[in-house]
C-alpha cells in the first residue's frame, strides 16, 4: 500500500530538526532509516502529516568511543557489525546481535537509535540495550537529558521521548575486559522479528564470581524485558550448571509472551529459558568458564 | 516536490509526491521497469538497487525524496555497451535464475556485496543474500554465480567494457 500523504522536510542539523518538531507538534515524525516507520506508514498504522528527514544532519552520523560508545541517530546498523572493535570479547553481545537484526540489506538503512525509538516488543536492539545498560540522549527545546534504557522504554512502541523532543544518540558503556556476552535469537526466517530472544552480558570478578550480569528477553511482554530477578540471582555467584538452570527457570517464569503465529505461550516461555541458558553458556565460555 | 536522482549515470528530475517510494519513482516516473516489486514490504529483496556505489537498499522501503542528489544503480545499468556485466554473465552461466523475478534484486545485492568484499566465502554469500528470496532455484546456483562473478571481478580488467 502507498502511505497517506505527508509533507516532507529536511533537517541539516539537530536545531533544524527541533525547529520543525516545534512547529508541527505531534503531527511530525522523525525519519532516519525508515525501516520500521515506512512499513508502518504503508500499512497505515502510522499517518504522520509531516516527516522530518534527519539524514542530511551530518552531526548525527557519528559513532565515537570515548569511555562510552556513542552512536548517533543516523548511524546504520551495518556500521556496528563492520566496526573495527566489534570483534573484541567485551562487545560480543552487540557483535552477535548486530548480525541477526532484520537482514543484511535492511541493516544498510536501518538505524540503531531508530530501532530503540520504535520500541517493538520483539526488538533486538532494545533487548541488547537493556543487557548492556545503555542510555539514550534526548534533546528538546528545554535542553538535553540522558535517560537510562529502562526508563526510555515506556510501553509497546512508546518511549520517553516527549512531544517536541528527539533522541539524538544511544550510549553504551564500554565493558571491562573480563566481560563477554551473547545474543540468542530464534526466528522463523531471516529478517523476522524474534519468536523469542535473549541478550546476556556477564562480567567476572577476579575470584571468578559474577560481578555483574545483564539479562534481557524479547517478545516476552509489552517491551523488551530486563529479567532483574535473574541478574540478582547471578550476581556474586560462582557460575555453575545449577545456577544457570535456576536462571533459566526464573526467566521462563518471568516471561509473559503472547500466543501468535510464531508459537504458543507455553512454547515461548520455555524458549526464553532455553535461550538464556545458551546465552549464559556462550558468554561464560568466551571468558574461559565451562558451566 | 522536485526530486533529482542520477540513475545509471543519467539524471532524472521529476516532480513527485513526497510519499512516492523509490521503487515506484524508478519504475513509473523514470520508466525503468527492471527493478521489480515483490512483497512491497521489505521482506523479499526483489526491489534492491545500489545507492552511491556500494550500498544495497530495498527501494520499496525508501522514499524517492531520500535519494535526492544520490546515485542509483539498477539492473539496466549493469551491462555496458551490449556486454553483460560479469555478475549477469555468471547468473547466465551458472543457471542462477529460473523465472527471473528475483534476479535484478539478487544481482544488485551481489554487486554491493562484491564491492564490500571481493573474496567472500560461501557463507558470506549466503548471509549477504539472506534478505533476498528466490522461490525457484533453491539458491545453490545463485551462490555459484556469485562465486564465479567474484572470481571474474578479481582478475585485472581486460581491455573492453566488462568489469565495472
Image (tube, coloured by chain):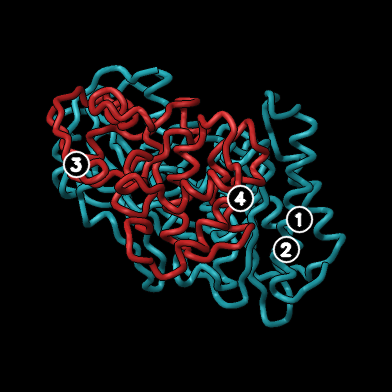
Chain colours: A cyan, B red
Q: Which mark is residue A282?
A: 2
Subunit of label 2: A
Q: Which mark is residue B143?
A: 4
Disc 3 is placed on an element classified as strand
Disc 2 is placed on an element classified as helix
Q: CA distance from mark 3 to mark 2?
A: 51 Å
Quadrant including the C terminus of chain A: bottom right
* Number of residues whose C-alpha sits closer than 10 Å to that of mark 4, classed few (under 14), some (14–19) or many (20 or more): many
Which residue is under mark 1? A278
Residue at point 41%, 70% (across, down): B156
Q: CA distance from mark 1 to mark 3?
A: 52 Å
Q: Is residue A22 visible?
A: no
Contact? badges 1 and 2 (CB < 8 Å) = yes
Q: Which mark is residue A185?
A: none
Which residue is under mark 3? B10
* Number of residues whose C-alpha sits closer than 10 Å to that of mark 1, classed few (under 14), some (14–19) or many (20 or more): some
Disc 4 is placed on an element classified as helix
Residue A248, position in %: x, y?
Answer: 78, 50
Please identify, in this view, whether the residue under mark 4 or under mark 1 is nearer the observer: 4
Subunit of label 4: B
Q: Is circle 3 on the same chain as circle 2? A: no
Amino acid at each position: 500500500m502507498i502511505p497517506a500523504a505527508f509533507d516532507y522536510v529536511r533537517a541539516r542539523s539537530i536545531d533544524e530538526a527541533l525547529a520543525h518538531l516545534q512547529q508541527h507538534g505531534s503531527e511530525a515524525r522523525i525519519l532516519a532509516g525508515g525501516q520500521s516507520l515506512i512499513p508502518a506508514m504503508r500499512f497505515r498504522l502510522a499517518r504522520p502529516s509531516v516527516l522530518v528527514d534527519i539524514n542530511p544532519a551530518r552531526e548525527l552520523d557519528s559513532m565515537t568511543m570515548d569511555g562510552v560508545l556513542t552512536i548517533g541517530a543516523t548511524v546504520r546498523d551495518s556500521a556496528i557489525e563492520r566496526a573495527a572493535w566489534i570483534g573484541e570479547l567485551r562487545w560480543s553481545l552487540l557483535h552477535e546481535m548486530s548480525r541477526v537484526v532484520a537482514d543484511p540489506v535492511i541493516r544498510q538503512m536501518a538505524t540503531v537509535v531508530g530501532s530503540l525509538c520504535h520500541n517493538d516488543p520483539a526488538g533486538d536492539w532494545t533487548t541488547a540495550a537493556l543487557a548492556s545498560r545503555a542510555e539514550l540522549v534526548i534533546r528538546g527545546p528545554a535542553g538535553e537529558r540522558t535517560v537510562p534504557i529502562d526508563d526510555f522504554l515506556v510501553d509497546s512502541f512508546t518511549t520517553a521521548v516527549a512531544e517536541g523532543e528527539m533522541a539524538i544518540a544511544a550510549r553504551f558503556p564500554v565493558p571491562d575486559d573480563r566481560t563477554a556476552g551473547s545474543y540468542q535469537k530464534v526466528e522463523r526466517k531471516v529478517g523476522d522479528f524474534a519468536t523469542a530472544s535473549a541478550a546476556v552480558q556477564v562480567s567476572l570478578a577476579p575470584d571468578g564470581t559474577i560481578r555483574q550480569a545483564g539479562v534481557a528477553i524479547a517478545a516476552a511482554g509489552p517491551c523488551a524485558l530486563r529479567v532483574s530477578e535473574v541478574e540478582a540471582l547471578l550476581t556474586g555467584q560462582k557460575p555453575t550448571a545449577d545456577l544457570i538452570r535456576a536462571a533459566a527457570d526464573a526467566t521462563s517464569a518471568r516471561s509473559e509472551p503472547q500466543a501468535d503465529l510464531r508459537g504458543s505461550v507455553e512454547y515461548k516461555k520455555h524458549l526464553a529459558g532455553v535461550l538464556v541458558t545458551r546465552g549464559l553458556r556462550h558468554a561464560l565460555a568466551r571468558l574461559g568458564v565451562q558451566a | 516536490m522536485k526530486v533529482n536522482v542520477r540513475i545509471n549515470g543519467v539524471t532524472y528530475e521529476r516532480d513527485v509526491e513526497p510519499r512516492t517510494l523509490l521503487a515506484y519513482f524508478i519504475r513509473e516516473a523514470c520508466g525503468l521497469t527492471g527493478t521489480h516489486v515483490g512483497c512491497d514490504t521489505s521482506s523479499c529483496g526483489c526491489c534492491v538497487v545500489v545507492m552511491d556505489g556500494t550500498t544495497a537498499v530495498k527501494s520499496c522501503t525508501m522514499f524517492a525524496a531520500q535519494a535526492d542528489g544520490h546515485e542509483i544503480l539498477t539492473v539496466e545499468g549493469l551491462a555496458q555497451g551490449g556486454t553483460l556485466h560479469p555478475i549477469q554473465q555468471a547468473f547466465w552461466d551458472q543457471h542462477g535464475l529460473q523465472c527471473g523475478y528475483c534476479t535484478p534484486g539478487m544481482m544488485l545485492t551481489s554487486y554491493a556485496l562484491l564491492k564490500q568484499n571481493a573474496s567472500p566465502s560461501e557463507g558470506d554469500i549466503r548471509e549477504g543474500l539472506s534478505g533476498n528470496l528466490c522461490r525457484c532455484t533453491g539458491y545453490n546456483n545463485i551462490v555459484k554465480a556469485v562465486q564465479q562473478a567474484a572470481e571474474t571481478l578479481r582478475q585485472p580488467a581486460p581491455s573492453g567494457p566488462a568489469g565495472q
